[in-house]
Amino acid sequence: MSDRHPLFYPLIVLGGVIEGFGLAYSGMARPEVVLDFLQFDDLGLVFVMGGAAVVSSVVFFVVPRLRDRAPLTGDTYGRRLKSMDRNVAVGGVVFGVGWGISGICPGAAYASIGIGNVTILWALAGMFLGAYLQGVWRSRGSERGATPATADD
């Protein structure tokens, strides 16, 4: 493990709290709002996602020009390029179907618990089960002589 700044984990928690608050405040932690968005009945979430995309784009463009290393980890900045392959396409479709059925994605599910939606625990259980089953499926494929799964897969 690399030497991390002592504020590394507290800042991760703070970032998660801010994101959770933003998801709850914007309505993205309420599955019915997300389902209305996916059915084109309420397009307010376009502004939420657009705002997040603008902020992220500015940070990813500006920060590497101001600093050569990440302030808390000391790691160099770099892009992680992932080629478009069958796994990416199938994973995206499965994620999209799950999002469309439940009206919630993993980050928003945790924020949804924070606003008192305990029934979302069923969706979280399904997400964990799906991730586990995918891991079992991938490990069995690599045991049969397929290319072993890596962290980038």
Image (tube, helix red, strand yellow):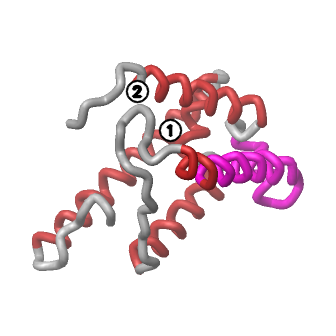
Residue at 76% of width from left, 29% of height from top?
25
Secondary structure state at the residue bearing disc 2: helix
Question: The C terminus is located in which quarter?
Answer: bottom left
- Cα gap from disc 1 to disc 2, whole angstroms: 31 Å
Q: Quadrant of residue 69?
A: top left
Residue at 45% of width from left, 48% of height from top?
68
Secondary structure state at the residue bearing disc 1: helix
Q: Position of residue 48 (x, y in %)?
A: 78, 45
Residue 71 position (above or below residue 10): below
Q: Position of residue 101 (x, y in %)?
A: 63, 56
Residue type indicated by callout 1: Trp
Reading the image, the residue beneath label 2 is: 8
The answer to whether mark 1 and mark 2 are in CB contact below 8 A is no
**Does the segment drawn in magenta span residue 64?**
no
Residue 105 position (above or below residue 26): below
Q: Position of residue 104 (x, y in %)?
A: 62, 46
Reading the image, the residue beneath label 1 is: 122
Residue type indicated by callout 2: Phe
Residue nearest the viewer, comparing 111 with 127: 111
Q: Position of residue 106 (x, y in %)?
A: 53, 44
Residue nearest the viewer, comparing 110 with 63: 63
Which region of the structure is painted magenta?
A: 31-60
